Image (cartoon, grey):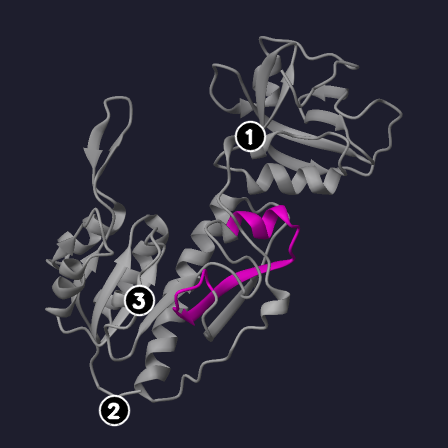
Amino acid sequence: MPETKSVFRIIFMGTPDFSVPALQGLIDGPDQVVAVVTQPDRPRGRGKKLSPPPVKVTAQAAAIPVLQPTRIKTAEFADELRSYEPDLIVVAAYGRILPASILDLPPYGCINIHGSLLPRHRGAAPIQWAILAGDKEAGVTIMEMDVGMDTGAMLLPAAIPIEEDDTAGSLFAKLSSLGATTLLKALELLHQDNLPPVEQDHSLATEAPPLKKEDGAIDWNRSAWQIHCLIRGMDPWPTAFSFLDGKRFRFFAPLLSEQDTDLEPGSIIAADRNGLLLATGDKALLVREIQPEGKKRMTVEAYLCGQSLEKGQKFSSVQ
């Protein structure tokens, strides 16, 4: 490790909303963000208009140079990064695996804000999988980057409890903020040469692969708690769903119930202003919001104002 510096020259690499608080914290902090690397603008919305990533918007507002390469595993791009003479590269949900040519470039290496308590949930979707797995706590880990998938040494972890009503969306927001504050603490310790790396226990590692739309299909034979976690972990994307009379319904805002039932899993026990009470593999589960096929997300109460759902009707995981 080189001699400790009072001000780091930092290249920041990130793309989505999750990355913005960390970038803003660096901009407002004592170090110097000399460049930002983010994904290319993408077409969004019905008009497919090119839209900049949130990180680009933040960087431009601070008059920081923005790089949006389509390829990063080239000597030319490594040379471009080197021209900024970075001491450190900070990564937060950039969306691409960095080659050795970038990892080895800055004297202080590359550090990443990973959205889990490593070695648990290595991969692209750690926040969703923390909920899907029924974990009681989530967190972030500031870590050294190496050529593996989230296998580098840990520098500074921080944990928060997962509340029973947390969704992937709400947890994203919490961990985005936590990631920013933990990063700044880590950099302060690094300035003091007091941030020793701790190797992960690889035997405890679990994977958090990207989610696919079909992962949201509800198997009603599973327990109420497992389905509760699935609905929350899939919210806001790709969403948990099931079919009734051939039509897809998406499910949100679940609530555990202690009610027993002898109805088959997936069957409606009751549908009223409180929500949709459904049979699972063990207890009943109350779902308070749904999105019928072709409609917007709404409360069950609102849906019942114009449509009916009857006791005994059965949702299915297949159309």
Residue matched to label 1:
214
* Among the two numbered marks 1 and 2 on one chain, the one whose residue lies closer to the N terminus: 2
Amino acid type for the residue under numbered disc 3? Ala
Three-letter amino acid code at the position of disc 2? Glu
Q: Is residue 189 left or right of 258 when viewed as pictured?
A: left
Residue furthest bottom as drawn: 3
Q: Amino acid at mark 1?
A: Glu
Compute the Cα span from label 1 to label 2: 51 Å
Q: Quadrant of the N terminus?
A: bottom left
Q: Report the front residue among 43 and 180.
A: 43
**Earlier-in-chain disc, 2 versus 3:** 2
Q: Quadrant of residue 35?
A: bottom left
The residue identified by callout 2 is 3
- Name the element at disc 1: helix
Q: Is residue 94 above or below residue 240?
A: below
At which x and y percent is residue 271?
A: 71, 19
Residue 283 badge: none
Give the residues in magenta. Answer: 127-150
Provide residue 292's location: percent of width, then percent of height: 55, 17
Position in image of residue 107 (x %, y %): 25, 80
Q: Is residue 315 above or below residue 13?
A: above
Density class for disc 3 (Cα within 10 Å; few <14, some 14-19, many ≥20) is: few
Horizontal side, residue 95 vs residue 159: left or right: left
Residue 100, labelled with which disc? 3
Could you classify mark 1 by the number of other residues whose Cα lies within 10 Å: few (under 14), some (14-19), or many (20 or more)? few
Q: Label 3's element?
A: helix
